[in-house]
Image: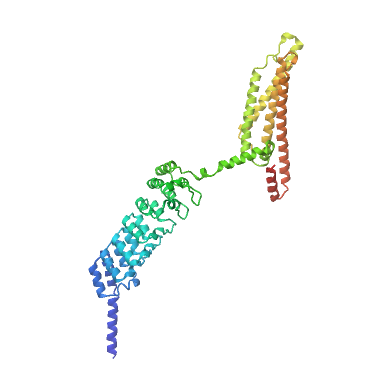
Amino acid sequence: MALAYVYIRVLCRYALSYYHSPNMETKLYEASLTGNVQALNALLHQDQLILDRLSLTGFNESPLHIAAMRGHHQFALLLLTQKPKLAVALDSQRRTPLHLASANGYLEMVQELVRVGGRDVCCFRDQDGFTPLHLAAMNEHLEVVKALVQANPDAAKEITETGETILHVCVSYNRMESLKVLMVLWNEEELAKITDHSGNTLLHAAAINKQTRILNFLLRIQSIKDNGNVVNKHGLTALDVLDQCPRDVKSLETRQVLMEAGVLRANDLRPSIPKQLTKSSRNKRKGFLSRTWARYVNNDHHWIEKQRGILIVAALVVAAMSFYSGINPPSKVLPNNTNGRFSYQSEMDDFNQFIVINLFTMITSLAIVLVLISGLPLSNKFLIWLLTVGTLFIMVTMVANYWDSLSNFGPDGYVDLTVVWTCLVMILICGVIALIHTIFFVTWVVIKLLKCGMPETHRKGNQDDAGEV
């Protein structure tokens, strides 16, 4: 009895060692590498469960994966006949045999795998988010692409892990023929609006990858050309995203294609001009005093720069006129000792007075110009006020000197009434402008001093109120 028991145990161990022999599994994978149908039949005759135990092996791919990769059609047919579930088996990268057959362009293999695995196998995605259709399009196997689309059109709608549509993948890989085949699944309006997860259109994708041939093809589609200035989620047009790419010869060619098609940058699309016109109209309605006060209260650096330019021009004009008057004084001002000693002394006094005033006007003008061109930080409102009042003052002295010179020409110091009133009006205007600037400057200083003792919230509120004066 004990001998019989030992005999049975030996037979069982032999059977298990035979059926689970790693040599049979190795032979199976060797047969799949070469596509040896006779060897597969022999292995199936020896062990009908060999395909059922594939899930227990340590191999990364099934024999059908290898056959699909190598294009062994008859070998794959036999495998699918014995075990149809192999059509949806996954390897270590979550690829089905259909992925491998599609990537390599084996049309008959693809058709058989789809027939056995069903239309849903076309939508299986690998670890990178690619379907068999993605891989076929990326490798431009057009017949396989058409077969997969015909089997399941929904496979073309699958999105990759990076958020790209299959059309974006075709553009990225420069597969224009695949793109043409797949574009028929969308109408023209949809093609213009199709985007990836970043909101990039097909034009964005072509610009990023500098695919000029595809760009020219896409821009021949009217709806895409009409929507060429669509911005992505970052507010960038196709021309903007191209500017962010490294510059080379291809980028220059791509930029030319986009610009010829009327594609603009996002900044050129913003309605900045209407806003400026609105602001300008609002400022015109305020009046001179309100605008000047707003410039004093708010830090309007543009106005300060403009004011500096005006002061330089005004000071240079006054300096030039003073210089000319100094070297060419009026003949009546020049002393003449033939008129007697007393008369000569009076003429010398007039001449000296003219020269002193003229020299003061010229030197002050040149000093103002020197300060303005010295590079000093003239954003300080005190300096701007001081230079403005100084320029107005030398204008007054120039007008007064002109008036005095005219009086020396006329008999007994006669000057026409029109000239007198003109000079007086000019002096009065300069005085009024200087007074306005002085009042605004003093008021601004007082407000600044009062704000120093206020909380931050009150300061902001008062500043806003002041800007609306």
Q: Nearer the viewer, residue 253 or 20?
A: 253
Q: Name the residue: 32% across, 69% down.
A: 84
Q: Nearer the viewer, residue 108 or 27?
A: 108
**Place of residue 63 in the rendered image (x, y in percent of width and height, measured from the top left):** 30, 67
Q: Is residue 30 visible?
A: no
* Image color mode: rainbow
Q: Residue at x 68, y 46 (%)?
A: 464
The image shows a total of numbered marks equal to 0
Seen from the viewer's position, the closer of residues 300 and 131 is 131
Residue 219 in picture, x, y percent from top left = 41, 46
Residue extending furthest left? 38
Image-based side of 114 in relation to 294, left or right:
left
Position in image of residue 122 (x %, y %)? 37, 62
Quick check: 254 left or right of 100? right
Residue at the extreme right: 342
Q: Position of residue 228 (x, y in %)?
A: 45, 46
**Where 35 sits versus 7, above or below?**
above
Q: Quadrant of residue 247?
A: top left
Tell me where residue 423 sits by quadrant: top right
Which quarter of the image is occupied by the C terminus?
A: top right
Q: Is residue 392 visible?
A: yes
Q: Quadrant of residue 334?
A: top right
- Quadrant of the snapshot with the N terminus: bottom left
